[in-house]
Image: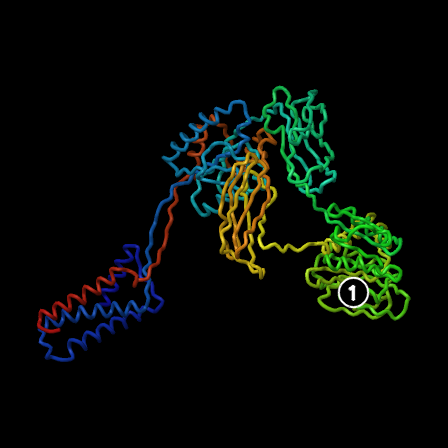
Amino acid sequence: MAICLIVGQVALRMMNVNLVFDYPVWVLLLCLLCGLVYSGMLYYKSSRSGFSLATKRILAVFRFITISILALLLLSPLVERKSQYVEEPLLIFVQDNSASLLLVQDTSYYRSDYLAGLYGFLEKMSDATDPRLYTFGESFSAERAIDFSEQVTHMSEVFYELDMRYSNRNIGAVVMAGDGLYNKGANPLYAAGRVHYPVYTIAMGDTLPRRDLILKRVNHNEITYLGNRFPVEIDIEALQSEGLNSRLSIRRNGDELFGKNITFASGHHVETISLHLEADEAGMQRYRASLDPVEGEVSLDNNYRDFFIDVIDGRQRVLILANSPHPDAGAIRESLVQNDHFEIDVSLVDQFQGSVEAYDLLILHQIPSVTHPSPAILSQAEEESTPILFVLGKQTDLEAFNRLSHGLDLQARSEALEETLPAYNQAFSLFSLQEATRSLLDYLPPLYSPFGTYALSGEAQVLLYQQIGQVMTERPLVVFFSPGDRRTGVITGEGLWRWRLHTFMRREGHHAFDDLISRMIQYLALKEDRRLFRIQTAPLVYENEAVLLEAELYNPAYELINEPEIRLEIFNEDGISFPYVMGRTANAYRLDAGIFEPGLYTWEAQVQAGGERYSEQGMFTVSPLDLEGLRTTADHRLLFQIAENTGAGMFFPDQWDDLRADILAREDLSPRMYAQKDFTELINLRAIFFIALLLLTLEWLIRKRSGSY
C-alpha cells in the first residue's frame, strides 16, 4: 500500500497536483497501520466467518482502503494544484471625455471620424494585444460613452486607477488621448513618473491661441446679512483681443446692478475687478456676471458665470448697558462691530427706553450698581431667558449681584480693587481660542478686580484664572455658567480697554482681542436648536454633485426615532415637483436625491409622529461647473513630456497606423506566463466521499451475497 501511495504521489506530481501535509511522512504509515489492524481484526480474528479465503482477502482490502482513507482525512491534508496560463500584453486606451475637446472649430470630426479611427485601431490591435478602453474626466470609467460632455478633467487619476486595477499585470502599453488640459488633481506629469510602462499620447485640440474672453473666477462670501454691502472680486482674461472693447456687468433678475466698460490693452489681457453690492433682499440670491462678446470669439460659454449668496435676515442683536460712561463699553462695541453676525446697541442704563425682549444677549457693565439696581431689566431678562455677560468693577453692587444666583458668589473684603493678570485654563472646553490670542494672554496688562472671596457653584467653566503677581490663584477672571437653557458669563474685572490698546501695540491690530470677545459673545448668544424635526443639506452644490439631505426626528423625550415615514418634495424654479421618501439609517434618515440642473431649488418635508404633524422647509442652489471653458488652448507640451518620460511617443489623431506600428515594434510587448497554486482540503473533494461509499457498498454486497451481514 505504501508503494501505491508513492506511485499515487508521483502520478499527482505529473498532473501538477500534490498532497501537502502538516505532519511528517511517516505519519502516513500510521494511517496504513490503522487500516491494516482494523481489517485484520475484522476478518482474520475468527476462522468461523463462513467466507472463503479469496472473499476474505477482497473484503479485507476494501475495509483496509476505507479505514486508511478515513485516517488520512483526519490529518487534514491539502491538495495543491499548479496551473499555468499565458496573458497577452494589455493595451489600455484612455480617452479624455471632457467638454474642452469640443472648443474647436470642427467638432464633427471628433464626434464621427475620430471615434471611427479609435475603434478601428483597437480592433487591429486585438490580434497582438488585449485592448481595454476607458474614459477619464470627472471619473475614470469603462462604461461611460465617449460624448465629450464631462465638466472636469482629472488626468492624474488615470495613473492611480491603473495602478489599483492592473498592479502586477502584463501592461504592454497605455495610450492616453486628450488635449493636455486638466483642472483637478495633481500634475499628471508627476503621477506618470512613477509608472513602469510606456504611455503613448494622442494630441487632440488646438494649440493656436484664438480670440476668447474668459470670466475666470468670481470671489465672494457665501453668506452675508441683510443691509450689508458685500465684496465681489472678478478675474477676467482676454486672448487675442488687443484694442477691442467689452462690458462687464452683474445682473440679478435681469436688472443690472453693476457695469464697467473694459478695453483690452494686449493680446493676453488679465484684470481683477473689485466691487461691492448691496444685500437688499433676504434669501438665496442668484447673480450673473457676464462679459459682452466680441466678434470672432471661439467660445461664448465662458463669458458668464453665475454665483449665489445667501442673504440672512438674522443677525443677533446685542445690547451693551453701562452704569456710567466707561471705555470698556466702547472697547467691547468696537470688537463686535467688526463681526457681521452681530448688531450692536450701546446705552447708559438710565437712558435705555427699549425692551430686553428685542435682544439676543445683554452685556451689563457694572450692573447692578447701588445707583442703578435695574430690577426691571434683570427680571425681564430672567423671564425671557436672555443670556447675560456681567462685567464687574468698582461700581458693581456685589450683594445685589450675589442675589441673582448665577453661579458666582463674591464676598468683598474691602472696597479696594487689586490688579489681576489673566491665566489661561488649559482644561477649558466650551470653545477654542486662536493660537495668536492665547499667546497674547501672557503679555496683557492686569484688570482691576474686587478683593474678596470667590465661590463657584454649579457647573462652572473657567476660561481665565486670576494671577496676582507671580501667584496663580483659583479665583476666576472669566467664567461661564449654563443652568438650564440659559447661559451666563462673568468678567470679574474692569479695564478691558487696556487689553485692546495693548493688543494694537504688540500686533499692530486688534484682531487677537476682537477674537477673544467675539468667541465669548458667540458662545453666550448661541441658541440651542430644540426642534423635534430637523433637516440639513448643503446650501450650495455643483452640478456634478449629488444633493444629499439628512434628517433627525426626536420624540418628546428628545430621543432619536426613525419609524415614521418622511415624505419630501423638491421644487425647481418652474414649480416642477420631484417627490421622494427619505431612507432610514441606524437612527435617522438620509436621502441621496441625485444630480440636478443648475438653478435655485426649494424643498418641503413632512412627517407624522406621536399624533403630531411636523414640517420643514428650505432651499439649496445648484451652481454650474464650467471649469472646461477656462482654458481653450491645448497643452501638447505636457502630453509630449509624459510620453517622452515613459519611453513612448506622441502622435496625432490621424496617425493611427504609425501609432500601431510603433507599439508592435516594441521588444517588451510580449505575452507573459504566470504560474498559480491553488490549495483545497482533501476532505472537500467529492470523489473521496464516493470512493469510500463505493468501497463500503461493495463490501456490504459481497457480505450479503456470501450469506453474512
The answer to which of 604 and 244 lies nearer the viewer is 604
Please state if 583 lies on the left or on the right of 20 as rendered: right
Quarter holding the C terminus is bottom left
Query: Badge 1 local density, few (<14 within 10 Å), some, or many (20+)?
Result: some
Quarter holding the N terminus is bottom left
Residue 433, image x, y percentages: 73, 55
Please state if 672 lies on the left or on the right of 205 as rendered: left
In the image, residue 541 sits, relative to residue 490, either above or below, namely above
| Residue 649 appearing in the image | no
Q: Secondary structure at mark 1?
A: loop
Q: Where does label 1 land, which residue?
A: 404
| Label total for image | 1
In the image, residue 336 sits, relative to residue 181, either above or below, namely below
Rendering quarter of residue 223: top right
Please state if 264 lies on the left or on the right of 646 as rendered: right
Please state if 232 lies on the left or on the right of 628 as rendered: right
The answer to which of 406 and 379 lies nearer the viewer is 379
Residue 435, image x, y percentages: 74, 55
| Residue 3 appearing in the image | yes
In the image, residue 339 sits, relative to residue 71, either above or below, namely above
Amino acid identity at mark 1: Leu
Query: Which residue is rendered at x = 80% and y = 52% of the image?
Result: 513
Residue 27, image x, y percentages: 31, 71
In the image, residue 318 sits, relative to residue 118, either above or below, namely below
